[in-house]
Amino acid sequence: MNSPKRIAVKVGSNVLTRPDGRLDISRMAALVDQIAELHHRGMEIMLVSSGAVASGRGALPHLKDESVAGRQLFAAVGQAKLIEHYCDLFQEYGITVGQILTTKENFVNESLKANQMRCMTAMLDNGVIPVINENDTVSVEELMFTDNDELSGLVARMMKAQVLVILSNVDGVFTGNPDDPASELIHDVRPGDDYSSCVGSSKSQFGRGGMMTKMKTALGVAADGIEVRIANGRRQDVLLNVLTDPEKAVCTRFHAK
Ligand code: GLU
C-alpha cells in the first residue's frame, strides 16, 4: 500500500496520562510533532483522543467520585484542559484544530450522522484537524460507546479512512500475556486468521477499553476494507514509522479484506 491519504488515529488515556493521573504533556507534544509532520506531507488526520476523564481526575485529586455525575464532572474539566493543550501544541506548527464531541446517537441516526460527517469533511477540506472524543458529560451508560476504540472505528468507517491507527501502551497483539517474555508480537493478522485465544480481557489503568475491544474493533474495521494498525503510543516516532514503513514498524497490522 502506498502512503495512505486519510487516516484516523486513536490515542488512549493510558498513552496521555501520567501514573498520577495528570496529562502527560511531553507525550502529547511528541504525538503532535508527528501528526504535524504527516499533515504537512499532505495526509488528512482525524485524531480520536481519550484522556478527558483521566485528566479531570488528575485536576481534582481531592474528589473521589466514580458515580455518573462524578465522571461527567471529570470529563467537563478534563476535556477543556485536553483541547487547550492540543490547540497550543498544534498552533506551534501553524495548524488549526477543531473539537468534536459526539455521542453514539450521531452514528445511529442517519440524518445526525450526515450532519456530523459534513462537519468533519468541512474541517478536513480546510486543513483543520478534528480532535474527536465522546461527549462524556452527557453520555449515559446504556448509550455509551464501548470505549474510544469503538468510536475510532466508527469515525474511520464514516469518513472512509484508508488506515486506522490505534495507539495504546503495548506494542500490539501478542501470542500471550505481553508481560511474559515468551510471548511474541503478532505483526500481521490477515482475513480469516483467528488469534482471539491470545488476548486476555484485562483493561488498561485509565481507559475503558482493553486489548479485547481493540481486537474486536480492528477485526470489524478490517472486514469493512480499512487496514488497522495497533501500536505503542509511547514509542519514539511511532506514528511516522507505522504510517510510512508499516512492514518494519513495531505494530500489529490487521489487513483489510
Ligand atoms: N472518552 C473517555 C475520555 O476521554 C475515554 C473512553 C475510553 O477510555 O476509551 O476520558
Image: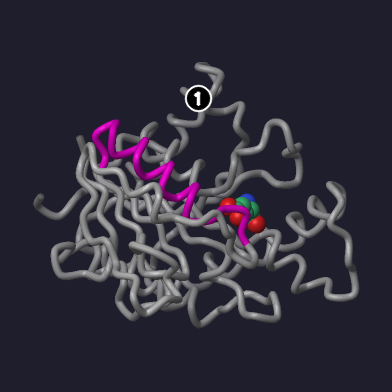
Mark 1: secondary structure: helix
Q: Residue 18: x, y in percent? A: 62, 79
Q: Residue at x 58, y 70 (%)?
A: 85
Q: Which color scheme is applied?
A: one colour
Q: Which residue is mark 1?
A: 113
Q: Residue 12: x, y in percent? A: 52, 61
Q: Residue at x 10, y 50 (%)?
A: 1
What's the magenta bit mostly, secondary-structure-wise? Answer: helix
Q: Residue 131: x, y in percent? A: 50, 53
Q: Is residue 204 above or below residue 152?
A: below
Kindly indicate the quadrant of the structure image that contains residue 96: bottom left
Question: From the viewer's perspective, is 99 left or right of 144?
Answer: left
Q: Residue 235: x, y in percent? A: 36, 78
Q: Residue at x 57, y 49 (%)?
A: 133
Looking at the picture, tell me which residue is in the foreground, 106 or 87: 106
Label 1 CB less than 8 angstroms from ligand 1? no
Q: Is residue 160 above or below residue 95?
A: above
Magenta range is: 207-226
Quarter, ligand 1: bottom right
